[in-house]
Image: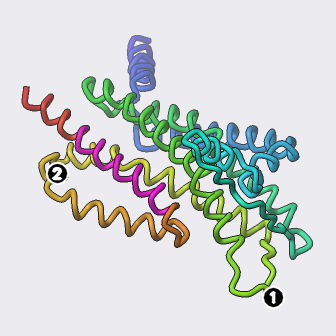
Amino acid sequence: MKKQSRKKAAETDSNSDPNMLTFGGHLEVLRRMLFRIIIVVMVIAIAVFCFKEKTFELLLAPSQWDFVTYRYIEKFLHYFGSNFTFNQFHINLIATELSSQFMTHITTALYLGLLGASPYILVELFRFITPALYENEKKYSVRVAATMYLLFIVGVLMSYFILFPISFRFLGTYSVSGMVESNITLKSYISTFTTLTLVMGLVFQLPIIAFFLGKLEMVSSELLRQYRKYAFLVIMVLAAIITPPDLMTLVLVTIPLYLLYEVSIFVLKRMERRSSK
């Protein structure tokens, strides 16, 4: 009886302590975590799918000539005495395949479901890796995860309100001849929208990447300061790749990306000061 009770106690202790889990036990925890994430993503995706009109009203808003970004730019310029106004334009969005609208609706719902569930996904990932962290690592890991999500959302918002509408306006209204009329497919519109959104969300992770590289002692604040000029050129090239070929969009993307580079220097400098104490 005593041996059985000790065995049960040992099993209870190993189950209560994640560090004592076997390889199979960790796989089971991972499986359950992925299952919960999939459920949450699907619930949000179904909700998005049901509110079709509102969803596509928001997604298609940047394609309109009177989008909020244009109005605020005009108000800003009018404040300084300028009479500048954006020209009205209209670009037809079409569907060229029988099932394209339905399939685009499904893929968009899944994408927005994944985006909406991203805070929960971060929480689940944090809960999964927490047992393997030391106490001092747990303290800053929460802040790192929160900062990653915040920077991602800022990148998404910048894409929605600045990069994508200006890109769509330039590329959609560009014409080599008056004989050629632009008709953009819905699939192309949504694909470009999601790609730019994801790219900007990832690009805005630059300070986090610098933080981890600094932890690995691969970069330092002094190194980044030394290569400022080269970094600015690289950022301009990167901005030119992910934006349409017009000067205004290039400037609007280059400035925040370079500011992120400066934030990375600040983060590394602060981390170095703390480690030196």
Q: How is the image coloured?
A: rainbow
Rendered residue at 27%/23% (across/down) = 135
Q: Nearer the viewer, residue 157 or 195?
A: 157
Residue 177 left/right relative to 16: right
Disc 1 designates what residue? 179
Residue 30 left/right relative to 9: right
Residue 172 left/right relative to 134: right
Q: Quadrant of residue 33?
A: top right
Check disc 2 and give the amino acid type: Arg
Q: Position of residue 97 (x, y in %)?
A: 88, 75
Residue 164 lies in the magenta stretch = no
The magenta region covers 249-266
The disc label shown at residue 225, or none:
2
Q: Main secondary structure of the magenta part?
A: helix
Q: Is residue 226 above or below residue 243?
A: above
Q: Quadrant of the N terminus?
A: top left
Labelled pair 1, 2 in contact (Cβ < 8 Å): no
Rendered residue at 69%/44% (across/down) = 68
Rendered residue at 66%/50% (across/down) = 70
